[in-house]
Amino acid sequence: MASQLVTTIRNLHLRKGRRRRGLTLAEGVRLVEEALEATVPIRGVVVSSDFAGPPRADALLREIAGRAVPIEQVPPRLFSELAGAETPQGVIAVIEHPSWTFDALQPGRGRPVLVLDAVQDPGNVGTLLRTAFALGAAGTVLLRGSADLQNPKVVRAAMGATFRLPSVAAELAEFVAWTRRANVRVWAAAADGTPLQRAKAPEHLALVVGNEGAGVRPAVREIAELQVAVPLARGAESLNVAVAAGILLYEVIRAP
């Protein structure tokens, strides 16, 4: 008979389970270490019975136990069933995912907000969050249609960024209201946009990148005062959304 913790982990692989419980999963040694360092509340931890041994694993287990977090050991076969990664690392934590509002977004010179418009792939969303955090963005906004912030694949790909970078899931109307309230100007990425080097970034900027196939939706483009592009070599059609966002963010952030 499955324990309550094992049942919870199975349930958190489903979006409706994450919404109902307000929890998600952090899987792997590094990600659980990141959660501990960011003081993210941890409800419980499941480890494979063959996890203990290496010094890093033992140190992680001692840290978890020292915080009075319940730890449950399960057979390797059951752990593989619970894990989302193709090559499980032997530890899964049930965590309370951080929650932010628009008030946490404080864009400024060299600190734009990255906006994801219906970016559907969890790996792309996690990579975008990781990139935005690494480059010093003020935060992210995920518009309708984007992968769930609490999706374990997003959390895993972000490698701790979801614990530290203010990120808000919002409807387009909520985003527009915030830009007006906070005096934030909007740029949208577009293949046929103005080459970025010809544009001067405003002090308070929200940079929108769009869906992997369709790009930024027309309704979102309409609120953008400028559409910008990464100039590509002749014959190149496009870039992966996470790569394009990384280049755009870097150029905006480093501009004087």
Image: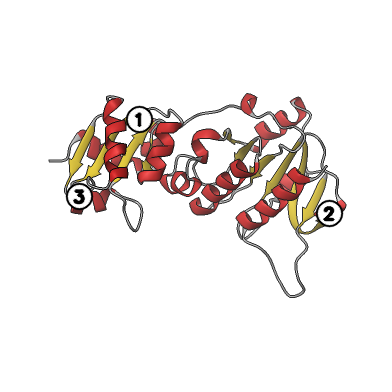
Q: Quadrant of residue 15?
A: top left
**151 left or right, relative to 6:** right
**52 left or right, relative to 138:** left
Label 2 CA crowd tier, 10 Å (few <14, some 14–19, many 20+) = some
Q: How much space separates mark 1 and mark 3, taking CA atoms? A: 22 Å
Q: How much space separates mark 2 and mark 3, taking CA atoms? A: 53 Å
Identify the residue at image location x=82%, y=57%. 195
Q: Earlier in the sequence, mark 1 or mark 3?
A: 1
Q: Which residue is mark 2?
A: 197
Mark 1 or mark 3: which is in front? 3
Q: Earlier in the sequence, mark 1 or mark 2?
A: 1
Q: Quadrant of residue 244?
A: bottom right
Give coordinates of residue 25: x percent, y percent: 37, 40
Identify the residue at image location x=47%, y=46%. 154
Q: Earlier in the sequence, mark 2 or mark 3?
A: 3
Label 1 CA crowd tier, 10 Å (few <14, some 14–19, many 20+) = many
As rendered, which of 48 and 5 lies closer to the eye? 48
Secondary structure of the residue carrying numbered label 1: strand
Mark number for residue 50? Answer: 3
User: Which amino acid type is marked by label 1?
Assistant: Ile
Image quarter where the N terminus lies is top left
Q: Which residue is mark 1?
A: 42
Image quarter where the C terminus lies is top right
As rendered, which of 95 and 174 lies closer to the eye? 95
